[in-house]
Amino acid sequence: MKKLSPNPPETPTDSDPLDPDATERVVSARLRNPRRADPISHIFTIVPDVGTETLLSHACETLASLNVLITDLACKLESSNRNVALSIQQLAVVAELLVNRVLDTIDPPEGAPAVQPGTQQ
């Protein structure tokens, strides 16, 4: 039986998204010249006029979702893999707490005293 399709190239091209060397070159170029556009980040954008409180609210919700996902994953893992997942989950919780504190500083909940930056409760 004859083969109808040509053989694929043996070496990855520069545009191969799975080539770790190509990714490293792009990231290194971005770090060397911060004014250079980051080709990877053009997939997702945030509307420029979105307020800080809205951005923080969405960040908090995203971190809460990450917390749930990682907790569910950790329940299915064992030994050191479970410990890694729980460490990631703990970082997500800490980040969520930090974002919530900033939100409380910007717009305190009703009946709660305003949290002043630089003060502790």
Image (cartoon, rainbow, N blue to C red):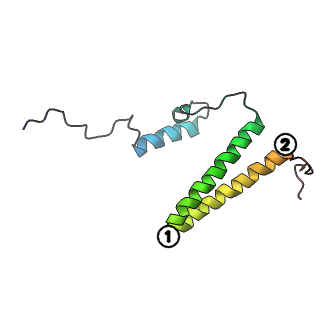
**Residue at x 77%, y 39% (from the top left corner):** 53
**Residue at x 89%, y 46% (from the top left corner):** 110
Percent across and percent down for residue 26 are 49, 38
Give the residue pinned by disc 1.
78
Q: Nearer the viewer, residue 113 or 31?
A: 113
Q: Which mark is residue 96?
A: none
Distance in Å between CA atoms under marks 1 and 2: 41 Å
Query: How many residues crowd mark 1 within 10 Å: few (<14), some (14–19), many (20+)?
Result: few
Quadrant in which residue 85 is drawn: bottom right
How many numbered marks appear?
A: 2
Looking at the picture, does residue 120 appear above or below residue 83? above
Looking at the picture, does residue 71 appear above or below residue 48? below
Are the residues at dot 1 and dot 2 in contact (C-beta closer than 8 Å)?
A: no
Percent across and percent down for residue 76 are 50, 65
Q: Which mark is residue 106?
A: 2
User: In the rendered view of the protein, which quadrant contains the C terminus?
Assistant: bottom right
